[in-house]
Protein backbone atom coordinates (compact mmCIF):
# COMPACT_ATOMS: atom_id res chain seq x y z
CA UNK A 1 0.00 0.00 0.00
CA UNK A 2 2.80 2.38 0.89
CA UNK A 3 6.16 1.33 -0.62
CA UNK A 4 8.03 4.52 0.40
CA UNK A 5 7.38 4.13 4.14
CA UNK A 6 10.08 2.78 6.46
CA UNK A 7 9.42 -0.16 6.86
CA UNK A 8 7.23 -0.65 3.71
CA UNK A 9 3.57 -1.31 4.47
CA UNK A 10 1.69 -4.03 2.57
CA UNK A 11 -1.83 -5.35 2.85
CA UNK A 12 -2.54 -9.05 2.93
CA UNK A 13 -5.56 -9.88 0.78
CA UNK A 14 -7.52 -12.81 -0.53
CA UNK A 15 -6.23 -13.43 -4.07
CA UNK A 16 -9.31 -15.50 -5.02
CA UNK A 17 -11.60 -12.61 -4.09
CA UNK A 18 -9.41 -10.20 -6.09
CA UNK A 19 -9.59 -12.42 -9.20
CA UNK A 20 -13.37 -12.78 -8.80
CA UNK A 21 -13.86 -8.99 -8.54
CA UNK A 22 -11.70 -8.22 -11.57
CA UNK A 23 -13.46 -10.90 -13.63
CA UNK A 24 -16.87 -9.59 -12.62
CA UNK A 25 -15.93 -6.01 -13.54
CA UNK A 26 -14.59 -7.17 -16.91
CA UNK A 27 -17.80 -9.09 -17.67
CA UNK A 28 -19.92 -6.05 -16.72
CA UNK A 29 -17.91 -3.86 -19.08
CA UNK A 30 -18.29 -6.44 -21.83
CA UNK A 31 -22.06 -6.59 -21.30
CA UNK A 32 -22.40 -2.81 -21.46
CA UNK A 33 -20.45 -2.50 -24.70
CA UNK A 34 -22.58 -2.94 -27.82
CA UNK A 35 -20.95 -3.67 -31.14
CA UNK A 36 -22.74 -1.95 -34.00
CA UNK A 37 -22.51 -3.47 -37.41
CA UNK A 38 -23.19 -1.85 -40.74
CA UNK A 39 -25.95 -3.83 -42.41
CA UNK A 40 -26.60 -3.48 -46.12
CA UNK A 41 -29.77 -3.45 -48.21
CA UNK A 42 -29.84 -3.35 -51.99
CA UNK A 43 -32.77 -1.74 -53.82
CA UNK A 44 -33.20 -1.73 -57.58
CA UNK A 45 -35.21 0.54 -59.85
CA UNK A 46 -37.75 -2.19 -60.58
CA UNK A 47 -38.16 -3.46 -57.01
CA UNK A 48 -41.84 -4.20 -56.39
CA UNK A 49 -43.84 -2.57 -53.62
CA UNK A 50 -44.16 -5.73 -51.52
CA UNK A 51 -40.42 -6.37 -51.77
CA UNK A 52 -39.80 -2.78 -50.71
CA UNK A 53 -42.04 -3.29 -47.67
CA UNK A 54 -40.04 -6.39 -46.69
CA UNK A 55 -36.76 -4.48 -47.01
CA UNK A 56 -38.18 -1.56 -45.00
CA UNK A 57 -39.26 -3.96 -42.25
CA UNK A 58 -35.76 -5.43 -42.08
CA UNK A 59 -34.21 -1.93 -42.04
CA UNK A 60 -36.52 -0.91 -39.18
CA UNK A 61 -35.52 -3.96 -37.13
CA UNK A 62 -31.83 -3.23 -37.66
CA UNK A 63 -32.21 0.44 -36.75
CA UNK A 64 -34.11 -0.49 -33.58
CA UNK A 65 -31.27 -2.83 -32.63
CA UNK A 66 -28.86 0.10 -33.02
CA UNK A 67 -27.10 -0.98 -36.21
CA UNK A 68 -26.15 1.31 -39.08
CA UNK A 69 -27.83 0.51 -42.39
CA UNK A 70 -26.27 1.11 -45.80
CA UNK A 71 -28.92 1.48 -48.51
CA UNK A 72 -27.74 0.92 -52.09
CA UNK A 73 -29.77 1.86 -55.16
CA UNK A 74 -28.28 -0.76 -57.47
CA UNK A 75 -28.02 0.28 -61.12
CA UNK A 76 -27.08 -1.95 -64.00
CA UNK A 77 -27.00 -1.63 -67.77
CA UNK A 78 -28.64 1.49 -69.14
CA UNK A 79 -30.01 2.46 -65.72
CA UNK A 80 -26.51 3.77 -64.90
CA UNK A 81 -26.96 6.56 -67.46
CA UNK A 82 -30.36 7.80 -66.27
CA UNK A 83 -30.85 11.31 -64.87
CA UNK A 84 -29.19 11.48 -61.41
CA UNK A 85 -32.00 13.70 -60.08
CA UNK A 86 -34.55 11.00 -60.96
CA UNK A 87 -32.43 8.30 -59.32
CA UNK A 88 -31.96 10.35 -56.13
CA UNK A 89 -35.70 11.00 -56.00
CA UNK A 90 -36.30 7.26 -56.35
CA UNK A 91 -34.00 6.52 -53.39
CA UNK A 92 -35.63 9.34 -51.37
CA UNK A 93 -39.05 7.82 -52.02
CA UNK A 94 -37.80 4.48 -50.64
CA UNK A 95 -36.33 6.16 -47.55
CA UNK A 96 -39.60 7.97 -46.80
CA UNK A 97 -41.49 4.72 -46.19
CA UNK A 98 -39.19 3.66 -43.33
CA UNK A 99 -41.31 3.99 -40.15
CA UNK A 100 -38.43 4.10 -37.65
CA UNK A 101 -36.95 7.52 -36.96
CA UNK A 102 -33.44 7.79 -38.34
CA UNK A 103 -30.80 10.25 -39.40
CA UNK A 104 -28.73 10.13 -42.55
CA UNK A 105 -25.14 9.48 -41.46
CA UNK A 106 -23.65 9.69 -44.97
CA UNK A 107 -25.33 11.77 -47.65
CA UNK A 108 -26.35 10.18 -50.93
CA UNK A 109 -23.36 9.72 -53.14
CA UNK A 110 -22.60 8.06 -56.43
CA UNK A 111 -20.88 4.72 -56.14
CA UNK A 112 -19.65 2.42 -58.92
CA UNK A 113 -22.85 0.36 -58.70
CA UNK A 114 -25.37 3.18 -58.16
CA UNK A 115 -26.24 5.53 -55.31
CA UNK A 116 -25.48 4.85 -51.65
CA UNK A 117 -26.53 6.36 -48.33
CA UNK A 118 -26.05 5.29 -44.71
CA UNK A 119 -28.71 5.54 -41.98
CA UNK A 120 -28.44 5.58 -38.19
CA UNK A 121 -31.09 5.53 -35.48
CA UNK A 122 -31.68 8.83 -33.76
CA UNK A 123 -30.20 8.73 -30.26
CA UNK A 124 -32.75 8.66 -27.45
CA UNK A 125 -35.70 7.47 -29.55
CA UNK A 126 -37.95 4.69 -28.34
CA UNK A 127 -38.42 1.68 -30.51
CA UNK A 128 -41.64 1.14 -32.41
CA UNK A 129 -42.30 -2.06 -30.44
CA UNK A 130 -42.39 -0.12 -27.19
CA UNK A 131 -44.80 2.40 -28.72
CA UNK A 132 -47.07 -0.43 -29.88
CA UNK A 133 -46.92 -2.08 -26.46
CA UNK A 134 -48.07 1.15 -24.82
CA UNK A 135 -51.32 1.18 -26.83
CA UNK A 136 -54.27 -0.29 -24.92
CA UNK A 137 -55.65 -3.50 -26.37
CA UNK A 138 -59.43 -3.58 -26.72
CA UNK A 139 -60.95 -7.04 -26.23
CA UNK A 140 -63.22 -8.41 -28.92
CA UNK A 141 -66.90 -8.62 -27.98
CA UNK A 142 -68.00 -12.13 -27.09
CA UNK A 143 -70.61 -13.84 -29.21
CA UNK A 144 -73.82 -14.88 -27.52
CA UNK A 145 -74.02 -18.59 -26.90
CA UNK A 146 -77.29 -20.36 -27.60
CA UNK A 147 -78.32 -23.30 -25.44
CA UNK A 148 -79.68 -26.58 -26.89
CA UNK A 149 -83.36 -25.82 -26.19
CA UNK A 150 -83.03 -22.38 -27.77
CA UNK A 151 -81.48 -23.92 -30.88
CA UNK A 152 -84.47 -26.28 -31.21
CA UNK A 153 -86.88 -23.34 -30.92
CA UNK A 154 -84.89 -21.45 -33.55
CA UNK A 155 -85.04 -24.44 -35.94
CA UNK A 156 -88.80 -24.72 -35.39
CA UNK A 157 -89.24 -21.00 -36.07
CA UNK A 158 -87.14 -21.20 -39.24
CA UNK A 159 -89.17 -24.20 -40.47
CA UNK A 160 -92.45 -22.38 -39.71
CA UNK A 161 -91.34 -19.29 -41.60
CA UNK A 162 -90.28 -21.34 -44.62
CA UNK A 163 -93.65 -23.10 -44.76
CA UNK A 164 -95.48 -19.82 -44.55
CA UNK A 165 -93.38 -18.29 -47.31
CA UNK A 166 -93.93 -21.14 -49.80
Image: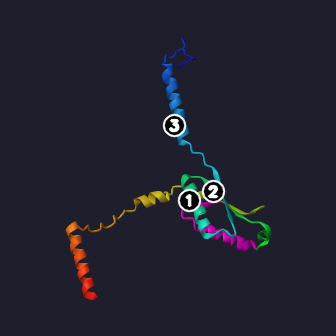
Q: Secondary structure at mark 3?
A: helix
In percent of width and height, residue 55 lies at 61, 62
Where is 30 relative to 134, above or below? above
Numbered badge on residue 79: none
Q: Secondary structure at mark 2?
A: strand
Q: CA distance from mark 2 to mark 3?
A: 28 Å
Q: Is residue 29 left or right of residue 72?
A: left
Q: How many numbered discs, if any?
A: 3
In percent of width and height, residue 162 lies at 27, 83
Judge by depth and name the residue closer to the eye, 141 or 86: 141
Which is closer to the viewer, label 1 or label 3? Answer: 1
Task: Identify the residue position indicated by label 1 in the image.
Answer: 60
Judge by depth and name the residue closer to the eye, 164 or 100: 164
In percent of width and height, residue 36 lies at 61, 48
Q: Which residues are magenta?
A: 83-110
Q: Earlier in the sequence, mark 1 or mark 3?
A: 3
Q: CA distance from mark 1 to mark 3?
A: 28 Å
Image coloring type: rainbow
Tell me which residue sits at (54%, 19%) in the image: 2
Task: Identify the residue position indicated by label 3 in the image.
Answer: 28
Numbered badge on residue 69: 2
**Callout 1: 10 Å neighbours few (<14), some, many (20+)?**
many
Query: Is residue 108 visible in this depiction of the protein?
Result: no
Specify the quadrant of the image occupied by residue 8. Answer: top right
Query: Is residue 124 visible in this depiction of the protein?
Result: yes
Which is closer to the viewer, label 2 or label 3? Answer: 2
Q: Secondary structure at mark 1?
A: helix
State yes or no: residue 121 in magenta: no
Tell me which residue sits at (59%, 68%) in the image: 50
Amino acid sequence: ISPNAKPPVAKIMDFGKYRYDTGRKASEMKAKSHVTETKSVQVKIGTGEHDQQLKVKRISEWLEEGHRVKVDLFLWGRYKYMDPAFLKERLDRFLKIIPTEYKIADEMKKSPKGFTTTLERLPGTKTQKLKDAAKPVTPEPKKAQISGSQQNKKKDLDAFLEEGMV
